[in-house]
């Protein structure tokens, strides 16, 4: 299906952004490949759109082809799950846990967006990320003009990053395969302190699979991170900034600034001798509390990491708030926050 001058804001969780010059909706893998090939042959800019939960689209819209992937497919072979890129991720997690009793993605419950986007961002939450279970990604390689299958290792996963994000104009994800676990109604080991505290268990213990799923949904809903059209706190792109990962020199400078304010900063070990700290903590301690802002775009009243559209915002309203927060954190702590959502036609 093809539409011209098509509104994009209704296709994003922020409800922001101008129109697409051309919007193509693809329902099969062949239609996806054909649409990409046509845009490439015409030398036309291409934007691939799934659930629209991780996008900030400029008010001018997109002067090219927007390909909306609406493919469907949920297949289980034992504990191996294959999802079409257009499958709604939250629905797929619910089916996997509640209908089939398989563990491995239960702590990723309630995350908006499509299955095809999960390996791009290496989606993660509550101590779990898809890098732990993705075994293969089937994608159209625009450079080679063919469908390829990449192993999990070939996806080059890291914190909120992947090969697909590093080469955004090369691959279009078609299908994702996950190796899950039949743990007899138990979850994978709890890795996240908030979840362990909720259940009163030590980290690395297992809890009931269904209970883990329901607990995460409750925790996310309490932070405005489960989509609800009636709740403007959920009119967001989820966490707007990634948690900073600092090298030893950056971390020492950050600790000195935090100590000067008599603050003890959260710290978590990261690869290569680096240290991860909390973006939410930085934002709050820099003076931007829940609900901050007096305009049509504000911080969520439930979570300082979510920038929200209160109903009448423009993309520029949202970006003005994001820049104010980024600059305030840099001034207070010397740490540069980086946006998590993909920017289309705009920069932070």
Image (tube, rainbow, N blue to C red):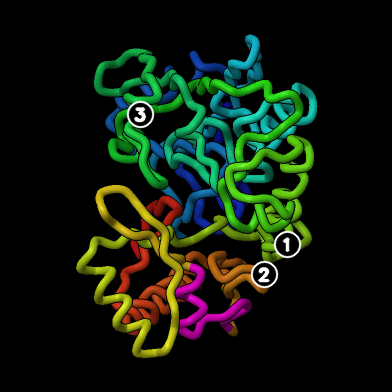
Q: In the rendered image, is residue 178 in sight?
A: yes
User: How many neighbours does mark 3 have within 10 angstroms: few (below 14), some (14-19), or many (20 or more)?
Assistant: many
Contact between labelled residues 2 and 1, with CB atoms less than 8 Å apart: yes
Which quarter shows the N terminus?
top right
The residue under the point 42% across, 59% down is 268
Q: Is residue 221 left or right of residue 105?
A: right
Measured in 3D between alpha carbons, the distance from the residue under mark 1 to the one under mark 2, in whole angstroms, is 7 Å
Return the x and y of residue 270 as percentages of the image width and height: 35, 52
Of labels 3 and 1, earlier in sequence is 3
Name the disc covering residue 155, or none. 3
Name the disc covering residue 222, or none. 1
The residue under the point 32% across, 83% down is 257
* Residue in the foreground of this view, choosing between 41 and 187: 187
Q: How many marks?
A: 3
The residue under the point 68% across, 33% down is 93
- Name of the residue lying farthest toward the bottom: 261
What residue range appears in magenta? 280-293
């Amino acid at each position: 299906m093809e539409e011209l001058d098509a509104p994009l804001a209704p296709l994003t969780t922020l409800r922001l952004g101008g129109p697409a010059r051309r919007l193509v909706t693809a329902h099969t893998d062949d239609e996806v490949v054909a649409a990409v090939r046509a845009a490439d042959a015409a030398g036309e800019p291409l934007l691939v759109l799934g659930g629209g939960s991780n996008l900030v689209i400029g008010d001018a819209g997109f002067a090219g082809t927007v390909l909306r992937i609406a493919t469907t497919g949920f297949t289980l072979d034992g504990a191996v799950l294959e999802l079409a890129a257009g499958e709604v991720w939250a629905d797929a997690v619910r089916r996997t846990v509640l209908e089939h009793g398989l563990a491995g993605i239960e702590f990723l419950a309630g995350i908006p967006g499509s299955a095809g986007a999960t390996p791009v961002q290496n989606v993660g939450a509550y101590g779990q990320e898809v890098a732990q279970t993705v075994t293969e990604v089937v994608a159209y390689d625009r450079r080679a003009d063919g469908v390829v299958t990449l192993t999990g290792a070939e996806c080059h996963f890291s914190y909120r990053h992947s090969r697909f994000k590093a080469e955004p104009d090369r691959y279009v994800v078609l299908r994702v395969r996950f190796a899950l676990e039949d743990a007899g109604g138990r979850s994978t080991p709890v890795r996240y302190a908030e979840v362990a505290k909720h259940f009163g268990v030590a980290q690395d213990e297992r809890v009931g699979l269904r209970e883990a799923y329901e607990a995460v949904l409750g925790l996310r809903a309490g932070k405005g991170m489960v989509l609800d059209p009636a709740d403007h706190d959920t009119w967001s792109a989820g966490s707007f900034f990634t948690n900073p990962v600092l090298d030893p020199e950056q971390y020492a400078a950050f600790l000195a600034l935090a100590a000067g304010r008599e603050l003890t900063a959260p710290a978590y070990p990261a690869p290569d001798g680096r240290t991860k700290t909390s973006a939410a903590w930085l934002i709050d301690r820099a003076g931007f509390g829940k609900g901050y802002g007096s305009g049509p775009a504000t911080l969520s009243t439930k979570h300082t990491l979510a920038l929200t559209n209160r109903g009448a915002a423009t993309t520029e309203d949202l970006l003005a708030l994001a820049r104010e927060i980024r600059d305030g954190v840099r001034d207070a702590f010397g740490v540069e926050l980086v946006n998590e959502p993909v920017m289309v036609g705009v920069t932070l």
